[in-house]
Image (spheres, coloured by chain):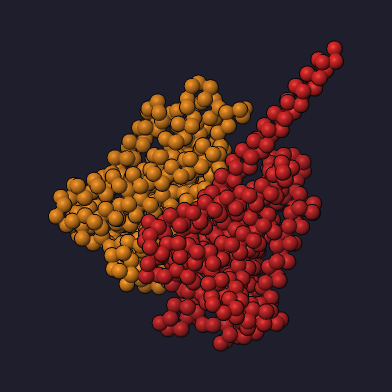
């Protein structure tokens, strides 16, 4: 049992579960405060999401919807955790996602190019934006959090302006890709049939999972990954060992930005949603990625499951809450609380290790005492 | 021109207040990325007071009650950062980011719930309307000069004196430079850091209510405070963590932000035909450039962002 608890993966999962339980509990209390009657039903609705649908067909279709939105979230989580492993907090993922969306939609709607070029455009745009943060960090000592936040807002307004001509007069959303350039939509390869004909389910699913595994391999099994993590643990030590810490910072940001850009590309090229040219706050996808990254214990594979959970409750809030009595943002509140609690994870693990170590020590002392006694008896 | 001056002054005072808040927190050694969230919560508290005040209340009580509640809300909310990052040694950037998201989500949920309850479910907008008593906040009717400007000036002078001329301020700064050295001469680092964070909560909360009452009499809480807390952080860095420089930096940023609000009133700017989005981007672009130029010789408190560990050398 103790050996089991000492395992790092087990500790991460336990910590994540604890965060989720406390987060959901706080959400429930808030629901109770708003309107006690129906709060129980509301919180189960949030947690159930697609399970609330009566027919199996509708359920799989809704599951497909949640999965389509989970994929960009996984990629944003990967973007954040990758940067975090190298000691960078990529809060700019939100802006890299925005600029990626702008780039792929521009290539699809204006230049009428096929999907793989649009996707590449999104990836490059995200990488370039993150590269600015990386350059500023490496050469001008500008904190990547601050530059990332500034770039978030700049890209939001820039993409709004870029997309404005593509919105029909009087509408806030851009025209659908399928109406102008169906070739820019991601191929489905029959995946839609698995989800009861949900046409939004595309190759984005397998691509995302493969990318997550690749990121895990890159971080844990390659020399570059080792160097990057070393830079994250101690920049000066890494420099002393001959690692190019400036290059590593910029490279990390480029990869993180590419991931966030890919998130936008895979999402908007699935045709699930159009760009709203009037939005006045940066889309939450990049920020929710922070929740996904930390709840997943900063592990690429963990991020897959944690991102699914975050998207699951977000959709549950939108799908099952009666907006005449509860605001659907309750789900955002829960994910924000979960991120906050993730700050305590380190403390939680430390306490757990201390408790285990102390009981180990006590056992050892007892053993010694017993041995001493028996030795004494012999004499 | 007059309008530009008014808006510049209002935005400058907001940026100054919030940047000073960040200044106190960082001088004590705690990075406060959560200022945006603190502003939202302060704005929420203050605007709810305005919403429920009757129009017959004397102006002075309106101002004092609003300020008091906004400050109290900011301080209480800032304790989330204090407890996590000081007592439990959490990652300060992570906790601050969570507080920003939590602030917007909590304010949206609160305002929507209030609107739903008031209208039996027919109105679920995240909007607080406080047009009833808003005019009482103004020093001169018809302008944007509110009594809050007076608070901003007083607090600026007070901050300067506290930081440089009092025992408390110098001890606070010591905790941000070298907490172990401070502790060795008997300063309670934990207490000082809590003080720094709570002062930043008070100033951030006040900044929030000043911001949302500038020129408008209603606020959509689902957009938070539109990145103003982050702009304040940029002001603080550009101001090199020093009150007087912070005011000058705030003036520059405030001017660009005000231009975005009132540029339509200038013929020559209108004739240039620059799209509105460029004006919206301007403060952020300027701050990015300014940061790139000024961060190299950064005077940031040395120990900021590092949880206090007694045993560390």
Q: Nearer the viewer, residue A131 or B305?
A: B305
**Residue B16 seen in the current view:** no
Residue at the far top in the pictured view: A379
- Give the quadrant of residue B152: top left
Say how many tags the image has: 0
For residue A101, side relative to residue B273 (left or right): right
For residue A287, side relative to residue A208 (left or right): left
Q: Position of residue A227 (x, y in %)?
A: 75, 48
State whether residue A241 is above or below residue B137. above
Image colour for chain A is red
Residue at the far front in the pictured view: A377
Q: Nearer the viewer, residue A375 or A363?
A: A375
- Give the quadrant of residue A279: bottom left
Image colour for chain B is orange
Residue at 72% x, 30% y: name it. A363
Q: Position of residue B35 (x, y in %)?
A: 44, 49
Q: Position of residue A93 (x, y in %)?
A: 58, 60
For residue A365, side relative to residue A374 (left or right): left
State whether residue A309 is above or below residue A350. below
The quadrant of the image that shows the N terminus of chain A is top right
Residue at 52% x, 51% y: name it. A22
For residue A131, side relative to residue B176 (left or right): right
State whether residue B300 is above or below residue A325. above
**Residue A335 seen in the current view:** yes
Residue at 68% x, 37% y: name it. A356
Q: Nearer the viewer, residue A170 or B223?
A: B223
């Amino acid at each position: 049992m103790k050996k089991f608890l000492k395992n790092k993966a087990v500790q991460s999962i336990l910590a994540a579960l604890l965060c989720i339980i406390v987060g959901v509990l706080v959400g429930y209390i808030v629901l109770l405060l708003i309107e006690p009657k129906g709060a129980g039903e509301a919180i189960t609705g949030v947690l159930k999401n697609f399970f609330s649908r009566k027919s199996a067909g509708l359920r799989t279709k809704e599951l497909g919807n949640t999965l389509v939105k989970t994929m960009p979230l996984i990629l944003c989580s990967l973007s954040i955790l990758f940067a975090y492993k190298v000691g960078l907090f990529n809060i700019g993922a939100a802006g890299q996602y925005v600029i990626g969306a702008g780039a792929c939609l521009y290539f699809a709607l204006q230049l009428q190019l096929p999907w793989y070029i649009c996707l590449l455009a999104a990836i490059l745009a995200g990488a370039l934006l993150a590269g600015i943060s990386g350059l500023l960090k490496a050469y001008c000592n500008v904190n990547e959090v601050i530059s990332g936040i500034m770039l978030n807002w700049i890209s939001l307004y820039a993409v709004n302006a870029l997309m404005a001509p593509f919105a029909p007069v009087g509408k806030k959303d851009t025209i659908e890709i399928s109406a102008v350039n169906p070739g820019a939509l991601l191929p489905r390869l029959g995946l839609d049939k698995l989800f009861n004909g949900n046409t939004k389910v595309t190759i984005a699913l397998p691509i995302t999972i493969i990318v997550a595994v690749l990121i895990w391999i890159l971080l844990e099994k390659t020399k570059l990954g080792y160097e990057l993590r070393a830079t994250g643990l101690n920049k000066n030590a890494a420099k002393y060992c001959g690692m190019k810490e400036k290059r590593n910072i910029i490279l990390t940001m480029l990869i993180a930005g590419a991931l966030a850009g890919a998130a936008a590309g895979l999402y908007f090229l699935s045709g699930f949603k159009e760009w709203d040219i009037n939005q006045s706050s940066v889309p939450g996808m990049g920020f929710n990625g922070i929740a996904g990254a930390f709840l997943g214990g900063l592990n690429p594979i963990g991020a897959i499951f944690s991102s699914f959970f975050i998207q699951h409750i977000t959709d549950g809030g939108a799908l099952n809450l009666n907006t005449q009595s509860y605001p659907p943002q309750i789900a955002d509140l829960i994910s924000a609380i979960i991120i906050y609690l993730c700050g305590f994870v380190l403390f939680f693990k430390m306490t757990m290790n201390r408790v285990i170590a102390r009981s180990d020590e006590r056992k050892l002392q007892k053993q010694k005492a017993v041995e001493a006694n028996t030795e004494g008896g012999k004499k | 021109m007059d309008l530009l001056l008014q808006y510049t002054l209002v935005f400058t005072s907001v940026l100054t207040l919030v940047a000073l808040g960040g200044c106190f927190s960082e001088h004590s050694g705690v990075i406060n990325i959560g200022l945006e969230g603190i502003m939202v919560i302060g704005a929420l508290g203050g605007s709810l007071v305005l919403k429920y005040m009757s129009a017959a209340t004397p102006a002075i009580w309106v101002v004092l009650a609003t300020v008091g509640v906004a400050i109290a809300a900011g301080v209480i909310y800032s304790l989330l950062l204090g407890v996590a990052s000081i007592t439990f040694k959490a990652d300060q950037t992570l906790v601050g980011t969570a507080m920003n998201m939590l602030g917007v989500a909590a304010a949206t949920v609160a305002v929507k719930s209030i609107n739903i309850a008031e209208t039996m479910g027919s109105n679920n907008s995240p909007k607080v309307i406080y047009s009833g008593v808003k005019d009482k906040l103004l020093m001169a009717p018809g302008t944007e000069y509110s009594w809050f400007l007076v608070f901003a000036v007083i607090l600026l002078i007070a901050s300067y004196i506290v930081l440089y001329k009092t025992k408390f301020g110098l001890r606070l700064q010591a905790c941000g430079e070298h907490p172990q050295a401070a502790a060795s001469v008997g300063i309670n680092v934990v207490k000082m850091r809590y003080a720094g964070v709570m002062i930043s909560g008070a100033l951030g909360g006040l900044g929030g209510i000043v911001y949302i009452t500038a020129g408008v009499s209603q606020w959509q809480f689902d957009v938070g405070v539109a990145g103003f807390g982050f702009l304040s952080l940029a002001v603080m860095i550009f101001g090199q963590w020093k009150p007087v420089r912070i005011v000058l930096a705030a003036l520059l940023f405030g001017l660009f932000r005000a231009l975005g609000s009132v540029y339509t009133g200038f013929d020559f700017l209108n004739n240039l035909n620059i799209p509105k989005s460029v004006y919206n981007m301007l403060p952020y672009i300027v701050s990015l450039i300014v940061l790139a130029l000024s961060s190299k010789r950064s005077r940031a408190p040395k120990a900021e962002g590092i949880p206090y560990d007694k045993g560390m050398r």
